[in-house]
Amino acid sequence: MSSAGHVFDMIRRIRGNKEGLTSNKAGFRDNIEIRDKRRTFLRFKKVSEPELKSIKNKIRYKAKLEKRRIFLITIVVTIVFVLAYVWVLFF
């Protein structure tokens, strides 16, 4: 019965994973409204149209910056690898 420790460790990890789920956290539970036993619905904040547009614009701006950052990192890494390859090949 040397596997008892492994089984206990597996059970402990499963419990830990269940406790860490997003749906079990208090902030997530506050936004859920249960109407019947089979379905749950999320409650969203009411926001005015101008405020909604500004929120969307902020999200789009952040996404654009993130795309640009990833593109620049890709270009720099590619150039470094090409220069390293050329240096190894010819020197």
Image (spheres, rainbow, N blue to C red):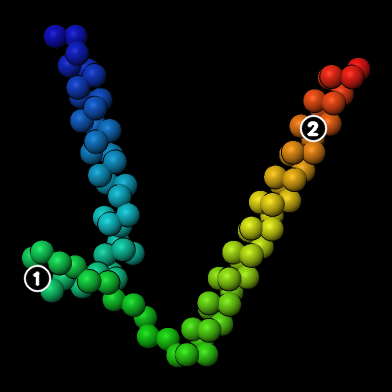
Q: Which residue is mark 1?
A: 36
Q: Which amino acid lies under the numbered mark 2 shown in the image of this protein?
A: Val
Rendered location of residue 48, percent (x, y): 45, 90
Q: Residue at 27% of width from left, 57% of height from top?
A: 23
Rendered location of residue 2, percent (x, y): 19, 9
Going by the image, does 20 lie left or right of 41?
right
Q: Quadrant of the C terminus?
A: top right
Q: Residues within 10 Å of mark 2 (few under 14, many from 20)?
A: few
Rendered location of residue 31, percent (x, y): 29, 71
Q: Residues within 10 Å of mark 1 (few under 14, many from 20)?
A: few
Q: Which residue is mark 2?
A: 82
Q: Residue at 74% of width from left, 39% of height from top?
A: 77
Q: How many marks?
A: 2
* Quadrant in which residue 22 is drawn: bottom left
**Tag 2 secondary structure:** helix
Examine the rendered structure and indicate whether residue 77 appears above or below residue 46: above
Which marked residue is nearer to the observer: mark 1 or mark 2? 2
Badge 1 or badge 2: first in the primary sequence: 1
Furthest-right residue in view?
Answer: 91
Examine the rendered structure and indicate whether residue 69 appears above or below residue 74: below
Q: Between 47 and 25, which is closer to the camera in this rendering?
A: 47
Examine the rendered structure and indicate whether residue 56 appears above or below residue 90: below
Examine the rendered structure and indicate whether residue 59 appears above or below residue 91: below
Rendered location of residue 3, percent (x, y): 19, 13
In the drawing, what numbered circle is on residue 19?
none
Q: Between 45 and 52, which is closer to the camera in this rendering?
A: 52
